[in-house]
Amino acid sequence: MKIAIPTVNGRLNMHFGHCVAFTLLDINPESKTITATTELDAPPHEPGLLPPWLAERGVNMIIAGGMGQRAQQLFNAQNIEVIVGAPAEDPETLVKAYMAGALEPGQNACDH
């Protein structure tokens, strides 16, 4: 499993489409451990570009602070699950909370 988190300065960027980077974390679901972490510069902001771009990199899930409904639909069409409303924490903290069943999403920070 591979989880993508939009980041700025090493923390979750609350506005998904305007992040400067993505942190990709490879997860072993059986042991619930992070096996690899990669940071990639985000491509230029262009509607509809990110879903196939992340799918090509093997992403299965996105943890975001905020994301519009249309973007969520485009990710779902690429078989990428989306969790919105996450707090602005570092990627490892978010993924560990998710794996422990303790990630408590709040309000979608970009519900438009």
Image (cartoon, helix red, strand yellow):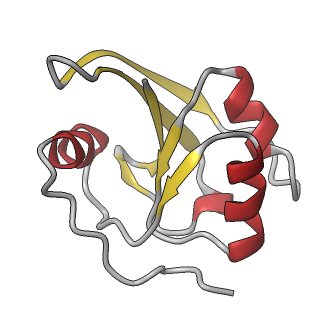
Q: Is residue 91 above or below residue 37?
A: below
The residue closer to the viewer here, 108 or 37, is 108
**Quadrant for the C terminus in the image:** bottom right
At horizontal 59% and vertical 54% (from top left) the residue drawn is 19
Q: Give left or right: position of 53 versus 6.
A: right
Q: Position of residue 85 (x, y in %)?
A: 39, 72
Locate residue 100: give its quadrant: top left
Locate residue 95: give its quadrant: top left
Q: Position of residue 18 (x, y in %)?
A: 66, 60
Q: Give left or right: position of 67 versus 52.
A: left
Q: Is residue 42 above or below residue 1?
A: below
Q: Is residue 7 visible?
A: yes
Q: Position of residue 14 (x, y in %)?
A: 47, 68
**Quadrant for the N terminus in the image:** top left
At horizontal 53% and vertical 55% (from top left) the residue drawn is 82
The residue closer to the viewer here, 110 or 11, is 110
At horizontal 31% and vertical 42% (from top left) the residue drawn is 91
- Count the labels in the image: 0
At horizontal 61% and vertical 42% (from top left) the residue drawn is 80
Q: Is residue 26 above or below residue 96?
A: above
Q: Give left or right: position of 58 versus 39.
A: right
Q: Is residue 6 visible?
A: no
